[in-house]
Every structure is written in C-alpha cells, then in structure tokens.
Image (cartoon, rainbow, N blue to C red):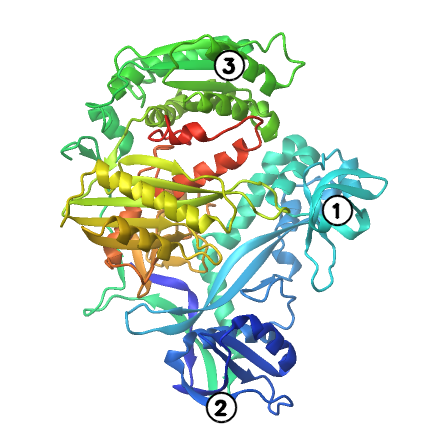
Amino acid sequence: MSISLNGFKIELSAQTFKAYVQELPNNQEIKSIREALGSEWFSYWREGKVYGIPNVTTVQTPFGQPEELVCNEHLQLLANRISDLLPSIFKAYKPLKYKPFIFLAQKEEKELVSAITNKIKGLPEIISSFKIFPKYILEPKIFAIHNDEAGLGLFLRLKTSWQIQASLTLLQSEGVDLQNLYVVRRSRVQGQRRLVGRIDRLVNDVVHLSESFDQIDSINEAEVLLEGSKASFSRCLKTILGGRYANFESARTEQESKLLIGPAVDTTLDEMRAFLVSKSPLNIASGLEGMIGSRIEVINTQEYQSVISASSIEYCFDAARTKRHHYPWVGIDKYGPFSRENFSKKTPEIIVFFPDTAQGAVEKFIWALHHGISIKEIDEYGYVEKETSRYTGGFAKIFGLVNPKFTLQPIPWFHNTNKPPATVYKDAIEQVLAHREVMPDAAIVVLFDTHERLPDKMNPYLNSKALLLMAGVPVQNILLSKISQPHKELQYTLQNLTVALYAKMNGTPWTVDHDQTISDELVIGVGTCELSGSRFTKRQRFVGITTVFRADGNYLLGNLSKECTYDEYPEELRNSTLSILQEIKNQNNWRPGDTIRLVFHAARALKNVDIAEIIAQCVAQVGEHQNIEFAFLTISHDHPFTVLDKSQRGIVKNSIRKGIYAPERGTIVQLGRYTRLLSTSSPRLMKRPTTPLPTPLLIHLHPQSTYYDLTYLSEQVLKFTSLSWKSLFPAPDPVTIYYSDLIAGLLARLSNVRGWSPQMLNIKLRASKWFL
C-alpha cells in the first residue's frame, strides 16, 4: 500500500503566536462583537473566550489583552484563521461559500456540457444553457496520523456544480413540465435565501409557487432560474433530447470521470498544491506564517501502525459458524440460510398482486421464482456443455422451505385504465384482505414502470404498501420490466428478491463471523426521520428510529418512537432507549456481574441534542448491575477526506482498467486519536471505469465512551456493511445506518398516503425487515 490523503501539510514557522483574548462566557454575543470590530479583526470563540488576530498592521478598534499562545494547543483556532485567509488567496474566484471555502472553475474548457456538445454533434441549441462546472472545496483540518503528533492540513474535495441558465418560458416551450421543480434567485442581496420556492405553474411571465419561504405566492420569471439539481437536469433533458438522452448521459459520465476518478483527483491535488505553494507563506498572525508543505502520506513505522488492512469477511450460515463462505449467494445455495433450522414459516403463503394485463409475464416469473431457471452453455457444435444459472434450485429448495404457496391476485386494470392507478390497486387489495381470515406471510406487488414514478399520493406501490403493512403484511415490489428480463439478467434479480423476501418474513439469510468473548454484545443504530417532506416548512414532526443487532449481525428488532417535535425528541429518545435496553436485558437474561458491550452507531449529530450523553445515561441506568462496555460512534460519508492508494493499479474488465488508486475494501486509516477512515468499496466493487474515487466512511468515537478499541470497532463497522439483505453486494454504510435511512425514506413517503399509520410496525412487524 502507498496511502495518501487529499490534503497538504501546513508547516508553521513558530511554536507560539500572539493573539488578543477577552472573556465571553455567552457565545450568543459573538455576533455583536464581530460587528463592532469590523474587518480589522479575525475573531474566534471557544470555551468562554474570544480570540482576536488583527487583519491590519495598525488597528483603530482595540480588543482584548495580548497573550502568547502555543500553536499545538490552539490548532482549531489556527485552522479557522487559515480558513478566513483563503478568499484572499483566490481573489479571482467568486466564493460560493466561505466555510468551507467553495469556488467554481472559471476556464470555459473545464465546463463539462460544452465538451459534450463538441463530441455529440447536432444537439439542440438550448443544451448550451445547461452547465456543469468543476467545484473545489478547501477546508483546513486537524489530523493526527500518529496519536501524539497532531498537525494542520488543507484538504481539497472535488465535486460538480449543475446550472440551468435557460429561462423558464423557453424550457416550457420545449415541452418541459415545470410543476414541482424548484426555482432559485438569479441574484440576491445579503440576508436573502437563494432557494425561492416550488413551481406550481408559469403563466404570463409569472411563476406561481405551491410552496415557498416567506409566504411568497408568486415571483416574476425574470428574477429566478430553475434550480440546477440532478432531478431538474433529468426531467428537462429527457424531454428535450428524447431518445438521445442516454447518449448524453453516457458522455456526461465520461466527462465527469475525467475530474473524479483516482488519477484525475491525484493530478488536481498536485496542481492545487503547486498553486498554493506559489501563494505561500500565509500570514496567520504576528510572528507566525504557514507554508504549504507536501501531500499528506500515511506511512507505518516500526513503532506505530497508522494504516491497517482488515481481514476479509466470511459469511456464516449456521449458529456454530462451521458453514462459511466469502460470497453470500454461494453460501446460501450451498448451505441454506442461517435461520434454516429454526425458521418459523416453513410453508409461507405469498400473495402476488399484479395488473391483469400482465398475467402471462407474471405467471412465468412466479414459476421461475418458485422452481428456478436454467441457463445452458452450448458449444460450437450445439451440445450442452454445462449449466451456468445462478438460480437453479428455486425458492423452496434454496431457502429450506416446504411447499411455499404463491397466490396470484390480479388487479383489474384492463377495464379501469381511466381511473387513478393507486385507487385501482388499493380498492382491489382492500377487497382481498377483507375476505381473508388469515393474512398471508408476505406480498409481492407488480407495477408498471410508469406507475413507479407517480407522486407519492398517487403512487400505487406506496398505497398498496401502506395498506398491507397496516394489515401486518410485509411487501416486496417489482417492476414489470424486471420480471420480463432474459434469464441471464433475471437470475440476479431473483437472487436479490428472494433474499429480501426471506428477510421480510423474519428470516436471517446470513450473519458474519464473530468471536463472542463476553456475556453479550449488541450493536444499536440510532436514527431520526423528519416527516414533513418539505424544504420550506419548519421541521416539526420527528420519529426516532432504533435498530438492534447482535454482534454477528443477527437482526433482533426495529423500533419507532412516537411522533414528536424537535424539542421533545431528546426526552422521547431517552424513553425509547430505556425501553429497548430493558427489553433486551430481559430477553437476553443479563445477570449481575455480566460483561455487556453496547456499541451505538449514529449517522449525524443533531443541533443542540447530545445523543451520546442521553444514550450514556440510559446505559448506566439499565446496566447498573452489569459491567457495561459502552461505545458511541458517529459514522458518515459527509466529510472532507479522501484516501488514495498510489500502489493500486485497479483491475481490468472488458479490456478497460477501473479502480486506479482506490484503496482495497477494509483499509483503515487513523485520522486522529478518536477518528478513523474506513474504505468500504474496492476496485472490484466499483461498477465501471468511470466510477468516481470512493469516499471512505469517517468513524468518530465519542470521548464519553468506555470502550476504546477503534480498530475492533472499525472492523465491526466493515462487517456490518456486509449485512444488508437488500442486495448481495455490501452496502455503502453499516446496516445500523443504512436500515435507518431506508426506514426514514419510506416513512417520509408513506406519510403522504391518506390513512397511513405506522402503528403495526412496532407490533407485528417489529422483527421484520419490512423496509428492504
């Protein structure tokens, strides 16, 4: 390995510097102090004090008392000071944001759409008003590759900024449906938001809004542009380009890869470093300068390992952990699922709802699902050489079931095409459920592809799912285009579908290897869902989401808290956590003196809510008679760091190399005493050569934890990325985070369905993976 980060060392010219310090216990007053000091001073508040550094040689407004500060004791202050200096280095660039410092490429040859129009001839003229610019994000950060050697680095991220400069009238004249897209201001004064509102309609140069900030009902078209989101691009360009859209997207992906794949990122880092060196030194404070140094490399020494490779993950298919395999489907096909012996629904009934106009295709699909499919490899003489199907056994044989029953229930679509699809599906399903004494164990809902994209309120899948979940029936949807695939593609669809379906019926397809050295170990995901679904209304309705797993990945339960306001959430989190921990304590029979390890995963911090503190109090209360080892981790892809492995040459597929400089899955890099970077992807997992360099997971251990082995905890996070039963491939996040995101996404969408209630999710479906 030859590991480096996406940043440059900042070398300080002295060990101390002069700053001016004033006591300020209440940080709410810092705004008025900054207004009084104006541009003469840089100011920074921390732990009851304001630190000031003059921006000019002679100040007119005095501030604080001079103090000589030690650099290594005030690295966060220095990082903020350097961030404040960045605009003066990039004077030629208009900042999109100051912290972190964000700006766009200015050279026209770096704009992506113009490169596409040069490559694909004859595109409509309006395409030139769509722009994709490289976006640069610079952020000073503290890093400590070795425990006691903290330093400052300037880190660079590369993204893209999408813009639509065409007028709304022109877009509408091209046939684009503008309803429900968002508009932003062309220019704004200080204090104004850029985002204005959501389009209802455009009439006579006036944009009428269905939602907006500040209760604006309408705005003049000349004042706004369509928001340059990927959703806006997709809708506009699909309409304008029609059948040529796929070619455009392919070209866009290729152009974007020239910016975001490993070698491109590496080249940009070298170019940025050369530019920054030419602007050095940075005048940080009186007597203190900062020089841009070398790229940050992560090198192991004989005394200390800063980067390690986790062991490859083995999937387990029995409680004794004797049946193992490195690939989940091969293991299931060979041994059966982990819960094969004790699965309580050996003869499940699965009801299949489908449009009556697709009955033939559905019957063929269900036969293949039930009995398996055959794909013969034929030699040049027409003789069968071997069976190549990856789904030969069928659902019953592979998953150890006995005579599973598939009940086909057509939706009367042929005579009701004039009605809303959601109404047709809902009425038919209600009628079926009303005449049943015993509910099925699961349902499959088949949809037309066009129906899947309907708004939530009118979406037949969401309306069907809401109705069936409230009846205690987990649901698996599938599109008509998927069930009609050739066998070569269908085999993989069936693999993913059957794993998810088995898990939804409370089955456990696989777990991971885990050595149990203590009485009990649980891994608990803590998440939230905001239910309004609006970008404009104040977020008021929250639901807490908790998922509980054994350390081997066995899913124990999921819990949804009561709906609450943001202010009520801390108390609701406390109550639900206490309830869950007490339930697990009783269920797992914790005894006095037992050593119990509780590992909590959360995706993000909430403003003014110390989740770790609340969790720690709950753990102490429930485990007062046990020896509790407690760790609280925040785990996120949203951070400024990237890892490159310069020794990684990638792999060749179809004569094209992919994954150059992408670290292997399981690479763990120390970033600080409490922080690690974990690579969850790899060249082999990257889908195509144009896939951008993967972003690692940032794992941060809360200092209040009582279990500190970050290597063990990072390896556990890696194992939990392999426990998603939505697909046979590892998830980008551990399932503690990933499942919470899936639940949150579905809850937010289901809340738009009339009559929906999540009550059954905490009762009959508590152990079901209904959200897969």
The answer to whether residue 260 is above or below residue 99 is above
Q: Amino acid at mark 2?
A: Pro
Count of labels in the image: 3
Q: CA distance from mark 1 to mark 2?
A: 55 Å
Can you name the residue that lies furthest to the bottom here?
Answer: 58
Instruction: Quarter of the image for the N terminus: give it.
Output: bottom left
Q: Are marks 1 and 3 in contact (CB under 8 Å)?
A: no
Q: Is residue 13 left or right of residue 116?
A: left
Circle 3 Cα neighbour tier, 10 Å, few/some/many (<14 / 14–19 / ≥20): some
Instruction: Quarter of the image for the C terminus: give it.
Output: top left
Q: Position of residue 640 (x, y in %)?
A: 46, 60
Q: CA distance from mark 1 to mark 3?
A: 45 Å
Q: Which comes before the other along the chain, label 1 or label 3?
A: 1
**Helix, strand or loop status at disc 2:** strand
Q: CA distance from mark 3 to mark 2?
A: 75 Å
Q: Amino acid at mark 3?
A: Ile
User: On the image, numbered disc 2 is attached to which residue?
Assistant: 66
Nearest to viewer (mark 1 / mark 2): 2
User: On the image, numbered disc 1 is attached to which residue?
Assistant: 166
Q: Position of residue 146 (x, y in %)?
A: 28, 69
Q: Which comes before the other along the chain, label 3 or label 2?
A: 2
Out of 421 and 387, give the one closest to the viewer: 421
Out of 703 and 242, give the one closest to the viewer: 703
Circle 1 Cα neighbour tier, 10 Å, few/some/many (<14 / 14–19 / ≥20): some
